[in-house]
Amino acid sequence: MSSRDRASRISPEAFEQLIHEQMAGHTLDFRVQSLVRQRAELRLAFDPAFVRPGGTLSGPTLFTLADLALYAAVLSEIGLVPLAVTTDMTIHFLRRPPPAALVAVATVLKAGRKLVYGHVEIASEATGNLVCHATGTYAVPPASVEGRG
């Protein structure tokens, strides 16, 4: 596969801008580490607000990061289509994440005309251990299907 085939259809900067401008109330301090066609790697900086009783990171924090990473991977495949939406997301918590930054790697497994399916692995930056695994599906709005190739 040539580098052109692997080129993302959206830049990391465009994705970050989309999230910060279009999602009211979004306050997560994340950065796109890499973005190639069908694969996104995001880093979420640690915030003490993510810690729940028991000294572990909260489930909603992990879920939000998984959804955000998969959205980036989906847009890397279909381009800047802000109205692509999550239709299904399942998350499995594998071990307690320590209070530290997280790294999520999302991969598109199948990109159809109407649905895009993928999975996400999230690891603790402190330990390198996988802390959760998620799978999800995004619906692609009909108007955006015409321009896909």
Image (cartoon, rainbow, N blue to C red):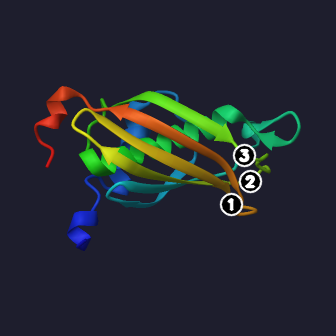
Q: Is residue 95 left or right of residue 24?
A: right
Please say if 21 is above or below 128. above
Q: Based on the displayed image, in which of its 4 quarters is residue 27 positioned?
A: top right
Please say if 92 is above or below 15. above
Which residue is found at the position 10% from the left and 37% from the top?
A: 146
- How far across and how far down the image is residue 24, in percent? 46, 27
Viewer can see residue 136? yes
Contact between labelled residues 1 and 2, with CB atoms less than 8 Å apart: yes
Q: CA distance from mark 1 to mark 3?
A: 15 Å
Contact between labelled residues 3 and 1, with CB atoms less than 8 Å apart: no
Q: CA distance from mark 2 to mark 1?
A: 7 Å
Tell me which amino acid carries mark 2. Ala
Of the pair 144 and 43, the residue shown nearer to us: 144
Tell me which amino acid carries mark 1. Glu
Mark 1, Cα crowd under 10 Å, few <14 / some 14-19 / many 20+, is many
Mark 2, Cα crowd under 10 Å, few <14 / some 14-19 / many 20+, is some
Which residue is found at the position 40% from the left and 56% from the top?
A: 39
Of the pair 2 and 55, the residue shown nearer to us: 2
Q: Is residue 136 left or right of residue 99?
A: left
Q: Is residue 100 left or right of residue 113?
A: right
Give the structural element (helix, strand or loop) at label 2.
loop
- How far across and how far down the image is residue 93, in percent? 70, 41
Which residue is found at the position 51% from the left and 32% from the top?
A: 89
Residue behind mark 1: 125
Residue behind mark 3: 94
Residue behind mark 2: 100
Which residue is found at the position 57% from the left and 51% from the top?
A: 121
Q: CA distance from mark 3 to mark 2?
A: 16 Å
- The numbered mark, 1 or 3, whose residue comes first in the sequence reads 3
Viewer can see residue 16? no
Tell me which amino acid carries mark 3. Leu
